[in-house]
Amino acid sequence: MAHQKKQHTSIDHLIIVVSDLQDATEQYSILLGRSPSWQGTHPDYGTANTLFQLDNVYLELLAVQGSGPAADIVQTLLDTRGPGLGGLVFGTQDATAFIERARSFDLMASDPVPGQGIDDNTGAQRHWRNIFWDAEAARGIFSFCIEHSETSSLPISAALAESPITAVDHVVVKTHSADAAKRFYGEQLGVRLALEQAVPEWGGTQLFFRASSMSIEVIASDKAPDHDEMWGLALKTADIDATQKRLLSAGVDVTDVKAGRKPGTRVCTVKSHTLAIPTLLIEHPVTDQ
């Protein structure tokens, strides 16, 4: 049997679908304390976006602009669920190896589909190849894998104020089936399952899939919706007291800082400027930063 190249799968970015891109960009700039890395359009897809590149992944605000396959997906999400988390995008440096591995575990991954984006402000171009699969493989969550061109890169979003958000800590997914989540994220995509534990108070199981210095936290219980759902987001800050003070000064509704579930962590909840996403801010001990 031929030797199969080890495939490393990363978490590339999270998609947030919005109805008003300009307003969403302004709100998220305040929340993150950062200016966009990129603002562009996709005429072939029928969408426009704003990207915020953080230390580990980027956040994509995506809106309909025109008509095309992506516009249809975004509009359907807006019509059925409203603005909020809309997609989970994985990354690879070798599309061929990713496809080979995925298909070997019965994930019917497409051949690579080329794409490009143009920054409306600078004229810069980015190129990539996308790998798609049926949404039912992820139990209803829109997801795909992207291979960026070696010549394409996103600058880190420039800080607009002190104590900006530094990275994504985790994204929360609700599901009925822990086994289905382990098969999709772990076996088919190759993302490492770092922790699995029973959570009696929630009536289910908690799974943490780890890549790109963040986690996909899957909460499996009978209370979950019929289709899997991206539910919440946790964002990292190096100084949560300073970040909370910055947000309060900017008119953001944010709770008091308190101890987090994980020993040594401190957290607060953001109540506005979140684009309808339940959002937690978290500060880890210095040794865990």
Image: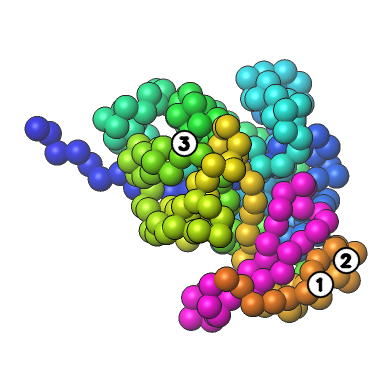
Q: Mark 3 and mark 2 in contact? Answer it, CB < 8 Å.
A: no
In front: 235, or 147? 235
Tag shown at residue 246 = 1
Q: Residue at x 77, y 47 (%)?
A: 275
Is residue 196 depicted above or below 135 in this figure?
below
Spatial CA distance of label 3 from label 2 is: 36 Å
Which contiguous range is marked in magenta?
Answer: 262-289
**Residue type, mark 1 in image:** Arg
Q: Earlier in the sequence, mark 1 or mark 3?
A: 3
* Cα distance between the residues tagged 2 and 1: 6 Å
Q: Position of residue 220 (x, y in %)?
A: 50, 46
Q: Quadrant of residue 97?
A: top left
Which residue position holds label 2?
Answer: 250
Q: Badge 2, how many Cα within 10 Å: few under 14, some, many 20+?
A: few
Task: Say what amino acid the circle numbered 3 marks.
Answer: Cys
Q: Which mark is residue 105?
A: none
Q: Amino acid at mark 2?
A: Ala
Residue shown at the point (42%, 59%) measured from the top left: 197
Marking on residue 145? 3
Colouring convention used in this rendered image of the protein: rainbow
Secondary structure type for disc 1 = helix
Q: Secondary structure at mark 3?
A: strand
Position in image of residue 251 (x %, y %): 90, 64
